[in-house]
Amino acid sequence: MMQSVRGIPFTIVQQLNEVNEVPRGIELIQAPKIWQDTRGEGIKIAVVDTGCDINHPDLKDRIMGGRNFTDDDQGNPEIFQDYNGHGTHVSGTIAATENNIGVVGVAPEASLLIVKVLNRHGVGQHDWIIKGIKYAIEQNVDIISMSLGGPDDNPELYRVIKQAVAKNILVVCAAGNEGDGNELTDEFAYPGRYNEVICVGAVNFDRHSSDFTSSHNEVDLVAPGEEILSTYIDGKYATLSGTSMATPHVSGALALIKVFANQYFDRQLSEPELYAQLIKRTIPLGFSPKVEGNGILYLTVPEHLAKVFDQEFADKIIRACAGGASLKI
């Protein structure tokens, strides 16, 4: 029996012909405050999904290429157009161009490799996904973003994901939308269950855990996943909800983190080191780790902590000067 995988189910809240704004999710994770340092330039992100609207005004300049591994368009590998909407929406959250129209993504100067492994119905075979990941590895991408999942553990899929991670590629996956509101129960989906991937759950704009987000002990962090505005097929825009929408926030953030961290340390960081840099930029929300992992993505955490310690140091000096006591550091 052929094993199939679907795009993580999502809810279409609204479709729009025109918008002009920085989406709230991008603001919530503090991405605009990082853009003065980097916008993700030079980073290649493989979007393993339903394809992309390659002519969308907010995306066409970000697409470096792609390939179709599905049965759409008679299996023509050169046509990776999106007929579903899911992949286009994900792509926009990651890297929609800042062009004074439409929306802007987390990393608006990153490059997108469109790897179409889900067809127009949002369904794919494990074999398509495995081939897609191998293609992404061959193209030397930095990040693989997968807002898809299924109930079956596939050893070959697991093997190729481990190959990607071994080559220092960050693999980001959705936790799933099968949550039942009970943190004591586990709702697993693959590949999000694999320990080697970065598994992303969803919260709303009030930073409350989304009712639909799957809970289990492989969730690494959470990001905005409700009423997320992004690009959509036919040059339009749409507001969607799901862990599929949370995942690209993290994929885009990793593009910013990789550029910034590599420059800061003056070397190329490994995949585990970049994961540590990501988790360093999370804040616990008080939910079970099975729901939120390490917490919500918040890119300016290090800057906030530095200010706290700077203020503590300044307070020590003021107290020492006022009391005439010696300052001990």
Image: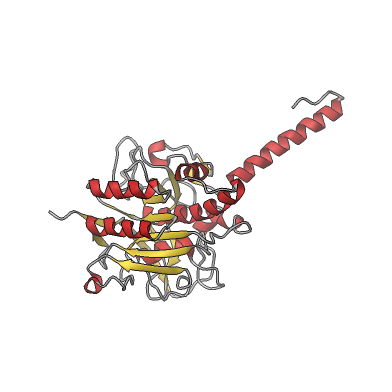
Q: Which of the two residues, 308 or 72, is positioned nearer the viewer here?
A: 72
Residue found at x 37% / y 46%:
197
Residue found at x 47% / y 37%:
286
Vertical comparison of 19 with 320: above or below: below
Q: Which of the two residues, 126 or 23, is positioned nearer the viewer here?
A: 126
Residue found at x 77% / y 30%:
316
Q: Residue furthest left?
A: 1
Query: How many numbered marks appear?
Result: 0
- Image x and y of residue 115, in percent: 34, 63
Residue found at x 59% / y 55%:
34
- Image x and y of residue 308, in percent: 67, 38
- Image x and y of residue 111, in percent: 47, 64
Q: Is residue 44 left or right of residue 75?
A: right
- Image x and y of residue 41, in percent: 54, 61
Which quadrant holds the C terminus?
Answer: top right
Q: Tell me if I can see residue 281 in this picture.
A: yes
* Colour scheme of the rendered structure: secondary structure
Q: Tell me if I can see residue 151 in this picture.
A: no
Q: Dividing the picture into quarters, in which one does residue 127 lie?
A: bottom left
Q: Is residue 71 left or right of residue 214?
A: left
Q: Is residue 127 left or right of residue 230?
A: left
Q: Dividing the picture into quarters, in which one does residue 37 lie?
A: bottom right
Q: Is residue 133 left or right of residue 126?
A: right
